[in-house]
Image: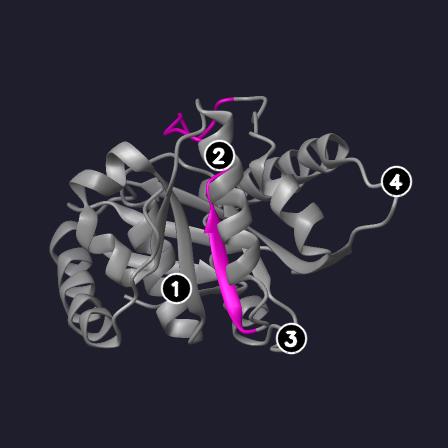
Amino acid sequence: MLKANKRAWFKKLFSIYNRNLFKRRFHSLHVSGLDNLRNKNSEIPLIIYANHSGWWDGLVVFEICRQAKADFYVMMEEKQLKSLFLFRKLGAFSVVREKPRNAVESINYAVELLKNPSATLLIFPQGEILPNDARPLKFYNGLSRIIEKSGKVLCLPMAIRYEFLGEFKPQIFVKIGEAGLIETEKNFKSKDLTGRNADILTNLLDKLKSDVAGENFSQYERVI
């Protein structure tokens, strides 16, 4: 597997590039629930799990984590990371889900990262880019296995949506749920948690869709 190779200097340069890129390609980025990330317990590691409906998703979460000053890592498909190898300097590491041995290695690496209580790990548990409104959401079990091996983590759902709303460029809307504490026990069943997390993110996506349809943006903060 390809491990993360974080470089603080590269993150600073990329942050400037990323914001300028968003300003060129999008009208704005609006986030609801950003304080749920800003005010997370610094003594417990955090896992963000989000839907994956577009190539931009990882860069969106990168900017949101930068705003919240979160120490950010992300699991990426190895074939994608090989072509975007500089993302390793931002905290990306690889996984090959089709190869169980490789997937286990990536899961164990993620667990090691989460031993740092200030760490934040991003996972797209759908494993591929899918239409935003596709139902039901189907998650791989990797997220639940990382939680199981970590023993005690905060899990925070994040819903992302791209919309054209009367502007020449599309707008991005993100709704962040509340972080829930999960402590694994003897009879913990990772497959049960997989379904529960999928239901939580489905509900959050539906609320985000409702907010956009009803133009209910009073709780959204414009960050770009």
Whether residue 40 appears in magenta in the rendering, the answer is: no
Chain part drawn in magenta = 118-134
Label located before the other in sequence (4 or 2): 2
Residue drawn at the location 63% of the way across and 34% of the way down: 198
Badge 2: residue crowd in 10 Å (few <14, some 14–19, many ≥20): some
> 145 or 19: which is nearer to us?
145
Is the residue 194 above or below the residue 15 in the image?
above
Instruction: Name the residue tied to disc 4.
Output: 187
Instruction: Locate residue 71, reporting x and y percent.
Output: 43, 70
Q: How far apart are labels 4 and 2 at the CA level? A: 23 Å
Label located before the other in sequence (2 or 3): 3
Q: How far apart are labels 2 and 1 at the CA level? A: 27 Å
Residue drawn at the location 58% of the way across and 76% of the way down: 39
Label 3 sits on a secondary structure element that is loop
Residue 114: quadrant of the picture: bottom right
Instruction: Name the residue tied to disc 1.
Output: 64
The secondary structure that most of the magenta stretch takes on is: loop
